[in-house]
Image (cartoon, rainbow, N blue to C red):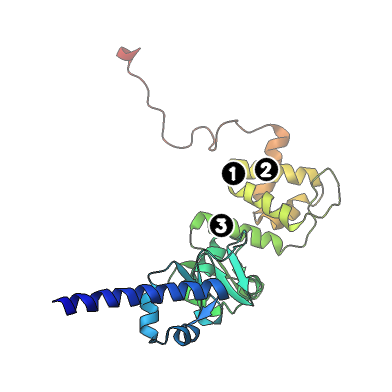
Amino acid sequence: MFARKSIIVTTLFMQTSDIQKIGHLMMSQKIVTLNEFKECLKTSRMTIIRRLRELPYISSYSHKGKYYTLSSIPTFSEEGLWSYNSVRFSKYDTLINTCHHFVNCSKSGYSVKELQAKLHVNVKLSLIVLFKRKDLYREKCKGEYVYFSKSYTRMKQQLLIRHSQNDTAVLNIDKLSIHVVTDELKAVIILFYSILNEKQRRLYAGLESLKIGHGGDTLISKFLNIDPETISKGRKELISGGFEKGRVRKQGAGRPEIKKNSWNN
C-alpha cells in the first residue's frame, strides 16, 4: 500500500516538473517546437502533448502549426496577429478560424491574393474548406473568386462595396466638383446606402444624381449598382416634392385600414 502511494506521489511530482520545464522553455525561447520539447524533457511526443494541454498555449497558424507559445507571451496587433522570427500566430488560433474571422469582418470580402498579403501564408485551401462547409459565400469579381460573409445582410454590404471599388468612375460630392472619391469614402457611402430602406435609397440616389447634373443617373447607377430608372424616379420625386415623408410605401399600399364601428366612437 505504501509503495503504491509512493509511486503516485512520484508520478505527480514528475508531471508537475514536466509542466514547469515546458513553461520555462516557452518563456525563455518564446516559441518552441515539439522536437525541442522532446530534447528538453527526454520523453515521448504524446506525453508532451498531454502536458501542453494543462497549459494556456497557442500554436502557430503558419509553418503547419508546429510552433507553440504561451498565450500570455504574444502582443497581438489590433487585427489579432503576432509574429516572432517569421512564425505567425493569431488570437483566433488556427489558420481556418483566422480566415473566417478576417472575411467576416472585412469591408468588401477577400480574394485569395488579398488575404494572403494580409496573413503572409497560403490561404487558398482554408478558404475553399470554409466555402464548402457553407461558412462563407463566394462570388467571382473581375475574374477571381472573392469570399464574403455567409450572413446575408453583411454579405450584401460587402458586395456593394466590392462592386463600387471595381468602378473607377468619378463621383462628384459637391456641385460639379471633380474630386475622385477614395476607397475609404466609397466604403462609408456604400455602407450608409445599404442601411436605408427602399424609398430612402431611391431618394438618396436621386439626390446624388442631381448634384452631378448631366449623366448623373448613369454614374450613380454604376457606383451604387442600382437601376438608372430607379434613380430617375427618385430624382423626379425630389424635384417635384411628390413623395410622402415617413412612408416607405405609397398611400393605399399594404393592408386596408380597419374602420371603427359606430359604437366605439
Q: Residue at x 69, y 59 (%)?
A: 164
Residue position for label 2: 204
Please say if the residues under marks 2 and 1 sit with CB atoms less than 8 Å apart: yes
Image coordinates of residue 236 in percent, x first then y, are 70, 40
Separation of disc 3 and disc 1 at Cα?
Answer: 13 Å
Tag 1: residue type?
Leu
Point out which mark residue 196 bears.
Answer: 1
Which comes sooner in the sequence, label 3 or label 1?
3
The local crowd at label 1, few if under 14, some if 14 to 19, many if 20 or more residues have their Cα within 10 Å, is: few
Q: Residue at x 59, y 79 (%)?
A: 122
Which comes sooner in the sequence, label 2 or label 1?
1
Tag 2: residue type?
Tyr
Q: Nearer the viewer, mark 2 or mark 3?
A: 3
Which quadrant would the C terminus be assigned to in this image?
top left
Separation of disc 2 and disc 1 at Cα?
Answer: 9 Å
Q: Residue at x 40, y 73 (%)?
A: 19
Which comes sooner in the sequence, label 2 or label 3?
3
Q: Residue at x 36, y 77 (%)?
A: 50
Residue position for label 3: 156
Between 173 and 78, which is closer to the camera in this rendering?
78
Between 102 and 211, which is closer to the camera in this rendering?
102
Between 99 and 43, which is closer to the camera in this rendering?
43
Image coordinates of residue 258 in percent, x first then y, are 37, 26
